[in-house]
Image (cartoon, rainbow, N blue to C red):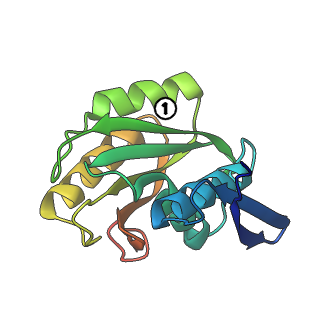
Amino acid sequence: MRSFHTALRVNDITGDYLVYTRNGEISSSEILLVARSITRARFVRGKILNSPAISKEYFVSELSLFDIEVFGCLFLDNRHRIIAFEKLFYGTIDATSVYPREVLKRVLALNANAVIFSHNHPAGSPEPSDADLVITERLVSALELINVRVLDHIIVGGTDTVSLAERGDI
């Protein structure tokens, strides 16, 4: 018996990508997984980040599917080129404990000169909480001691985002 596959064509500046499914239906989760793989391919080590919009796209693809809070850090060199992205802390459905000491250890280990933080709000609203603002201030203060700049903290709620830098909170 022959099996037929349905193809989804996803267009990108650099080409087309085809996704095949077994049952002929493509779920939104499958589409987001394809989008994540495309976005990851565009965020390779050494790529320069020069816009909050580019960072937001990346963080949505990395964090929007989690049903718990996840806090990540994009580590950058002195020219704002990507060194690495790491998910550092995993929490519950509405909170994550973030430890500045652990963030500093990773910054030093990767020899980063700047960082962009991001975390998700599984409930869907990207509005920052008071706790989000407090931990951001603590991280900025801790990293200032070793001359590492916090460029932004982007909160992801579904496909919506809030940039603390764009709001003037960093």
Q: What residue is drawn where x is 49% and y is 42%?
A: 148
Q: Is residue 86 above or below residue 165?
A: above
Comparing 109 with 15, the one in front is 15
Comparing 85 with 152, the one in front is 85
Indicate left or right for 13 with 53 as reference: right
Q: What residue is drawn where x is 46% and y is 27%?
A: 106
Q: Residue furthest front?
A: 1
Q: Is residue 54 above or below residue 81?
A: below
Q: Quadrant of the C terminus?
A: bottom left
Indicate left or right for 94 with 116 as reference: left
Q: Secondary structure at mark 1?
A: helix
Residue 23 lies, in percent from the top left, at 56, 58
Q: What residue is drawn where x is 43% and y is 75%?
A: 166
Residue behind mark 1: 107
Comparing 143 with 85, the one in front is 85
Q: Amino acid at mark 1?
A: Val
Comparing 119 with 62, the one in front is 62
- Residue 58 visible? The answer is no
Residue 7 lies, in percent from the top left, at 71, 65
Q: Is residue 90 above or below residue 132?
A: above
Residue 6 lies, in percent from the top left, at 68, 65
Q: What residue is drawn where x is 57% and y is 36%?
A: 112
How many labels sit on residues?
A: 1
Q: Residue furthest right?
A: 15
Query: Which class describes the residues within 10 Å of circle 1: few (<14), some (14-19), or many (20+)?
Result: many
